[in-house]
């Protein structure tokens, strides 16, 4: 690799970063549905034709922003989980949830992009799937770890059959566990829904004048969700 090639690569990487930063500012001002390559080009003082060499369409730019957001929130969750006691999957799960909340509060428009209303006319390509499932894979892994370690309480009232999730979901989870945990996949889904739903209600103002202490309520909501699948987030393992 020559010095000139390296310089061109650095210049391209820097301009790519600037384009995505300008697009993120536009998300905050007008929302994802109104994202415009021409407007981003104007913001950067570039000709539209120059921008198209980096992102050939609005959807290509949206995809880049979505992948970045999913990877950022995934990294935050993983870092949070790593900060808790390794032998306590419940504590690691709560720490991951707190980290996702903190990321969302610091990046509300990116959170809305990936967890809010779908962008009209946009179809996410398959290369968004791996980043999009980064947080869910972490959460699922912690539940599996708790189950394998004997730290998961069996349900007092199992869900009636048949199974309520699609077969491909069961397959990706390695199938339904044996009784009394046969409904664990369904129950675990409530963890994800509670996490994103509780953050969304706070972030989008649905809890205004309802909750007096957001961090404390968030912890309470996550504790209730964890209890529904038998995961203890308050007491360390014996």
Image (spheres, rainbow, N blue to C red):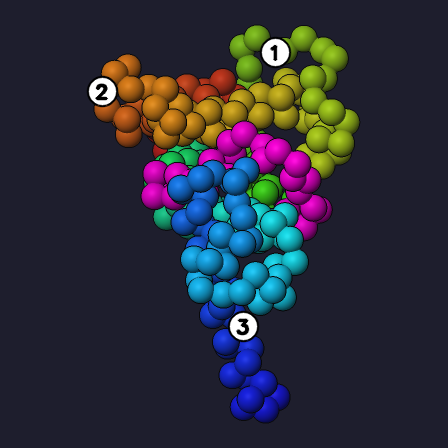
For mark 2, give the secondary structure.
loop
Highlighted range, magenta: 103-128
**Dot 3 lies on which element?**
helix
Frontmost residue, 202 versus 25: 25
Q: CA distance from mark 2 to mark 3?
A: 47 Å
The residue tagged 3 is 12
Instruction: Identify the image quadrant of the N terminus.
Output: bottom right
Check residue 159 for magenta coloring: no
* Residue located beneath label 1 in the image: 158
Residue at the spot 60% in from the left edge and 41% down from the top edge: 133
Residue 6 at x, y percent in the picture: 54, 84
First-in-chain label (2 vs 1): 1
In the rendered image, the residue lying farthest to the bottom is: 2
Q: Looking at the image, is 61 positioned above or below residue 201?
A: below
* Of pointers 3 and 1, the one earlier in the residue sequence: 3
The reply to whether the C-beta atoms of the residues labelled 2 and 1 are less than 8 Å apart is no
Q: Are marks 2 and 3 in contact (CB under 8 Å)?
A: no
Magenta stretch: residue 111 in it? yes
Q: Which residue is mark 2?
A: 212
């Amino acid at each position: 690799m020559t010095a000139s090639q390296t310089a061109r690569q650095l210049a391209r990487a820097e301009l790519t970063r600037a384009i995505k930063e300008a697009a993120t500012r536009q998300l905050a001002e007008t929302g994802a549905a109104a994202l415009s390559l021409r407007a981003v080009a104007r913001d950067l003082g570039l000709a539209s034709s120059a921008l198209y060499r980096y992102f050939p369409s609005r959807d290509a730019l949206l995809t880049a922003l979505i992948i970045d957001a999913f990877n950022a929130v995934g990294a935050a969750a993983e870092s949070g989980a790593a900060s808790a006691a390794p032998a306590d999957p419940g504590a690691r799960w709560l720490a991951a949830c707190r980290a996702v909340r903190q990321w969302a509060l610091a990046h509300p428009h990116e959170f809305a992009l990936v967890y809010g209303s779908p962008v009209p006319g946009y179809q996410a390509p398959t290369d968004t799937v791996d980043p999009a499932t980064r947080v869910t894979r972490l959460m699922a892994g912690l539940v599996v770890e708790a189950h394998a370690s004997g730290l998961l309480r069996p349900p007092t009232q199992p869900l009636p059959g048949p199974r309520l999730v699609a077969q491909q979901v069961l397959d990706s989870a390695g199938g339904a566990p044996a009784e009394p945990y046969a409904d664990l996949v369904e129950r675990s889904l409530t963890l994800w829904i509670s996490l994103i739903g509780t953050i969304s209600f706070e972030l989008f103002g649905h809890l205004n004048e309802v909750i007096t202490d957001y961090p404390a309520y968030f912890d309470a909501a996550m504790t209730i969700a964890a209890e529904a699948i038998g995961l203890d987030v308050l007491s360390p393992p014996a």
